[in-house]
Amino acid sequence: MEQDIRFCALGDGAKIAYSTTGHGPSLVFVPRWVSHLELNWQSRRGLLTPVAEHFRLVRYDKRGTGLSDRPLEDFSIDGQLRDLTALIEELGLGRFSLYASSGGGPIAVSYAALHPERVENLVLYGSFAQLDGVTGRRQTSEALVSLMRAEWGLASTALTDVFMPGASSEEREDFALTQRLSAESEIAARFWEAFVLADVRALLPRVQARTLVVHSKGDRAIPLQCGWELATAIRGAQFVTLESDRHILSPELERQLWTAVLDFLSEKGEGSRDRITAHERMRPANPAGLSDREVEVLRLIAEGKTNQQIADQLVISLNTVAHHVSNIFAKAGLGNRAQAASYAHLHHLM
């Protein structure tokens, strides 16, 4: 099966490249950070062909990347949303499904929220509504952006450790080369900065489409908490986790991803009336092995209580509270109270 690549002229004269593959209901892919239609198809053809047997796949390169026109000034989520909207209008799509991974998530969420009459299904893999830098640390993001601008080749190689820990040397080389050919260093850096600043949390309750959120449990690039936040804020969303620490999945795991996506889109197994919501799927978990008292203290931390307030409420000494807090941080690998609150919510311990 081959892809048919064409170009869509935007209002300002720029052209973005898009491809269509297969037949059936339209499934529009919102690209992640940077992309390249030809290179991505070469590496993922075997994985996407089974999907194209059921759906008409519509994929595109954002302007500034891949086969699309490279000049670009507006890197904002709103700017990317305008281009997606223009492409959808150009293709004359009525009702369709949206798939987005990683940095494509905020654009897909925005479109689904603002055009509920158009989007029937929404699938988000490894994505987020708001992200304060890679792995949630802004200084890490700023360092990566500086490296992209200074030495794009080195940065694209370094990113494999974030996106694909444990990848083979061949996977690492292919990934790094694809990044470099997908966008120039300044374009890649500007897009990265735009995603760090993105915040579409206010739009999540407005999404009416049936939604599936999939996330790798140990994702180092975009933490599991980001997927959890998407699933809990979008009404009725399903939440599925993959046993992996990779953001860019191995072929085996990506096959699992697409099996889950096809089952969801065709309503196999878990039909629309029997969908498992994020709240139901994420049962209470205590992977750090906290004691009952430590869980109790953790809940109060998540409620914003100070150590003194916790001591007063539990009728224990301030030193005892400090001891429990220290144990909680050590067992769960937490660095501060904000992370502790996120941990409590993520593992449904509230």
Image (cartoon, grey):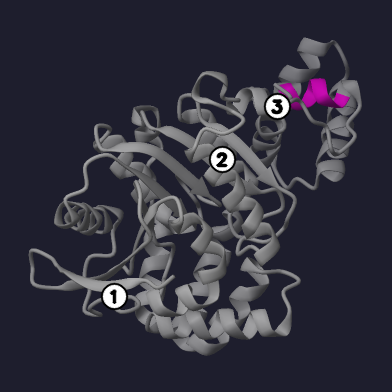
Quarter of the picture containing the N terminus is: bottom left
Quarter of the picture containing the C terminus is top right
Checking the image for residue 64, the label placed there is 1
* Residue 348 badge: 3
Looking at the image, is mark 2 or mark 1 earlier in the sequence? Answer: 1
Range of magenta residues = 294-299
- Return the x and y of residue 88 as percentages of the image width and height: 21, 53
Position of residue 56 relative to residue 41, above or below, is above
Q: Could you give the CA–CA distance between mark 3 and mark 1, rounded to whole angstroms?
A: 41 Å
Question: Alpha carbon of mark 3 to alpha carbon of mark 2: how far?
Answer: 26 Å
Q: Which residue is mark 2?
A: 263
Say which of 270 and 223 sits in front: 270
Does dot 3 land on a helix, a strand or a loop?
loop
Label 3 sits on what residue type?
His
The image shows residue 324 at horizontal and vertical percentages of 87, 30
The answer to which image quadrant residue 308 occupies is top right
